[in-house]
Image: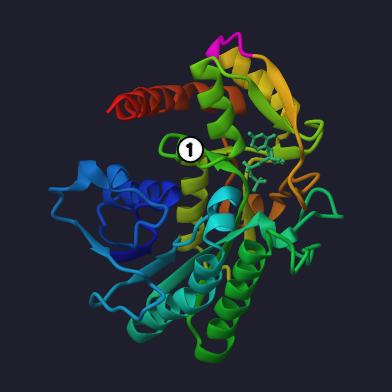
Amino acid sequence: MRALITGAAGFLGSHLTDALLADGHSVVGVDNLCTGSLENLKHLQSDPHFELHQHDICTPFDYGKVDFVFNFASPASPEDYARLGIETLQVGSAGTRNALDVAEKYQAGFLHASTSECYGDPTVHPQTEDYWGNVNPVGPRSVYDESKRFSEALVMAYHRYRKVDTRLVRIFNTYGPRLQANDGRVISNFIMQALQGNDLTVYGKGDQTRSFCYVSDEIDGFLRLARSTEHSPVNIGNPTEWTILECARAVLRVTGSNSKIVYRPLPQDDPMQRRPDITRARRLLGWEPAIDLETGLKLSLEYFRSSFSSSEVSDKQ
Ligand code: UDP
């Protein structure tokens, strides 16, 4: 199979690229590098089954016949999409449409990376796929949430009106190597703060919850969904729920750091609770995550340590 991945230089896109290549497929990567990094694909430079096109998918593109399109291009951390608000709205609308046009042209399968942010600050807990969400359409997170919700509508419209063979995955908080060390997300912030001996910054009281999935489990879920014939959204995330304070303590345990926990203001519209109901993924895909948070944090440490040493080097230059 020849697969096209938009956002191939990103955290999830690059792991997906590796997994497809390992399964014997060819991968065409597309990325404008606005938040992705060539470093994530450096090891593939001389792989004959991989090609990378530096291109913004908001402008139409065509790199020849493909059998499957994975649409993963978008800023995704709250700090990144706040900085790149218009770009985020654009990639979830024009960008997704251009990717769908490629799938339609080549009658390829299509999997779109959607998000638990479609549920907003949820009033239903845990979140099932049939919950419509509680999203502020004009708040600071709206550039991401509404972009992803519009993408879902577009994907379903291409499925209904143009018979494109689409899939929608709703991704919950995911972490692991290649998560940008400085993207402001909770896991990257806490690990970097712990390794550098800085205070861990808990926003609010730390009683808001998230459910963290290790990247290899998440990618396994994507591949199973891609092989299925399911067109409705499927949650892929780890259903074990942690408060942010518990998460900070887990990072301190795993790193052995003596850093202190300090409290900072809670950002506006920060969801209070988030946990996927994965009944659908279990039933349709036989999927469930295997790696718990502390194991996954241990597996991520080496990567963050090396990001830490390279940021020290660049600070000195
Ligand atoms: N958070 C925190 N300290 C940080 C970064 C994030 O307490 O240094 C909190 C944030 O307020 C949110 C949760 O951790 O409640 C997860 O934030 P993240 O940015 O990773 O992603 P989100 O799930 O909000 O999209």
Give the percent coordinates (x, y) of residue 278: 69, 49
- Pointer 1 residue Cβ closer than 8 Å to ligand 1: no
Q: Is residue 108 above or below residue 145?
A: below
Give the percent coordinates (x, y) of residue 173: 61, 44
One can see residue 291 in this view: no
Q: Is residue 6 above or below residue 303?
A: below
Q: Is residue 317 above or below residue 92?
A: above
Left or right, residue 303 beside residue 247 = left
Q: How many marks?
A: 1
Give the percent coordinates (x, y) of residue 162: 50, 89
**Quarter of the image with the N terminus in it:** bottom left
**Between 223 and 74, the one nearer to me in the picture:** 74
**Between 59 and 14, the one nearer to me in the picture:** 59
The residue that mark 1 highlights is 182
**Which residue occupies the extreme bottom position in the image?**
161
Q: How is the image coloured?
A: rainbow
Considering the numbered disc 1 on the image, is that residue within a helix, a strand or a loop?
A: loop
**Residue occupying the point 73% across, 46% down:** 267
